[in-house]
Amino acid sequence: MTCSRAIPVLRDAQLGCNLALMSDTKRNILIFLAMILVILGALVFYFVRGDTAQLTTEQLSGPSPVITEPREEIFPTINVAAVSSWAEGEQPTPAQGLSVSRFAEGLDHPRSMLVLSNGDVLVTETNSPPRENKGIEGWIMRKLMNRAGAGTPSANRIRLLRDSDGDGVAESNEVFLDNLNSPFGMEVIGNTLYVANTDALVAYPFTVGDTKIAGEGEKIVDLSASKPNNHWTRNIIASEDGTKIYVAVGSATNIAEKGLDVEMGRAMVLEVDLETKKSIPYSVGLRNPVGMDRHPETGMLWTVVNERDMLGSDLAPDYLAQVEIGTHFGWPWIYWGTYEDLRVVPRRADLIEYVRRPDYALGAHTAPLGLVFSEGATLGAPFDNGAFIALHGSWNRKPAAGYKVVYVPFNENGQPDVERDEEGNVTSGLPVDVLTDFLNNDGDARGRPTMVAIDATGGLLVTDDVSGIIWRVQGSGTAASDTEAAAQ
């Protein structure tokens, strides 16, 4: 072979080697990238699959719930029930001896209610103010809110519903007050209606029987709406003498992870003096208190509270608690009286000896919102001495919990009525189901019970914010003539 012929052959051989090497390198890179993707996929699956509960809601309820070791989550368990609204003629299932009907429907995200002395019912059509969550976290939150039926803009108004003939159906439904800012709590004292927007307590001149209020109203006090304003509801209730109003204000975050500065004026019940227009903390360390009511015999103030997230599906139990001046319930450092949340820095283990333990657990992540004592209700035994509580339902527990209305029996001393066996186990006094089946067989939410009230005829009203319905529960033996007579 001549040199002139050998050079091309060598050149071709070298090119072939280079191509083979390039092919091997490319293949190795692709294999490496595939391995990385598999590992990342496995990690994502591991972290986002969520935590499955090891205990039942019954074990996590009552005065002595089982408190497990925390199972801290990097990503929260996500188990949001998609919305599949009630079909025509469908309804939740009432307890034996009770019946349920539609008091009003076609509402826009109904939440809190106020039953007036003439029987009129005020209901807020309200939702979260615009959220400013940005980036991936904000995108995920918006997706979850939309899936849960909570992503709609707030209507920012109050409607007046009137059942003139006492048949359990509101014939009149009209806008009573609008141009509000995510309104929630309402209270009437004398000739004044107080409305709690997410950022202020406002007073309006009002006489029972009026069907509309116009005007801006008078601001009594500002209420913290620091960003993020995740727990935006502001429920209110008057003192027994009508000189003060108590305001339930939830925390801005889960466990003060944005710093304590954004939690100023939050995670507490405030006492507002209506004469001086000043507010002071009344009871603190309450992550997200919402429903409030006074026990009819003792006059003591009670509230239901949504506890912290990302400690697993069994922690921490939401609860019902008696609220007194100067009490501290531990948030963000302590939960259920004596358990320290080690995620919170700086630590405050010194608080444990001062923290008040809640009175009654309602299960983990059940999201209790509405609370009303049974005074005036005509549902009959065993629903004649206790508290009705609306459990809005979990979004971060497997399996789902809540999505129903329950009843907690009370004793003659104004405390939850619990009996125990010789070993100290609770034998009676756990929550009793009143209205269930808000989740269908596929796990979708046909509705979510939100707030509760006793109407002028003794029926239990339940707002269902997802479906836009107010349900009315009554004793199935209650005759229509009895109901109409009670309304007159």
Image: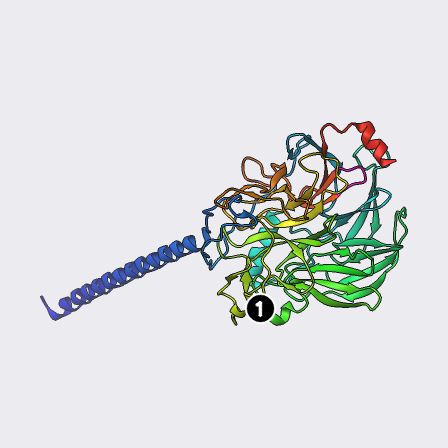
Q: How would you classify the magenta stretch by its main secondary structure?
A: loop
Residue at the spot 23% in from the left edge and 65% down from the top edge = 18
Measured along the vertical axis of the image, is residue 280 above or below residue 389? Answer: below
Q: Quadrant of residue 283?
A: bottom right
Instruction: Check disc 1 and report its element: helix, strand or loop.
Output: loop
Instruction: Give the residue at mark 1.
Output: 258
Left or right placement of residue 328 versus residue 376 in this view: left
Measured along the vertical axis of the image, is residue 482 above or below residue 303? Answer: above
Quadrant location of the N terminus in the rendered image: bottom left
Q: Which residues are magenta?
A: 454-459
Residue 235 pos. (x, y %): 72, 55
Residue 75 pos. (x, y %): 48, 57
Quadrant location of the C terminus in the rendered image: top right
Q: Is residue 455 magenta?
A: yes
Instruction: Specify the color scheme.
Output: rainbow
Left or right placement of residue 426 versus residue 17 in this view: right
Residue 468 pos. (x, y %): 71, 42
Judge whether residue 357 can be spotted in this image. Answer: yes
Nearer the observer, 26 or 337: 337
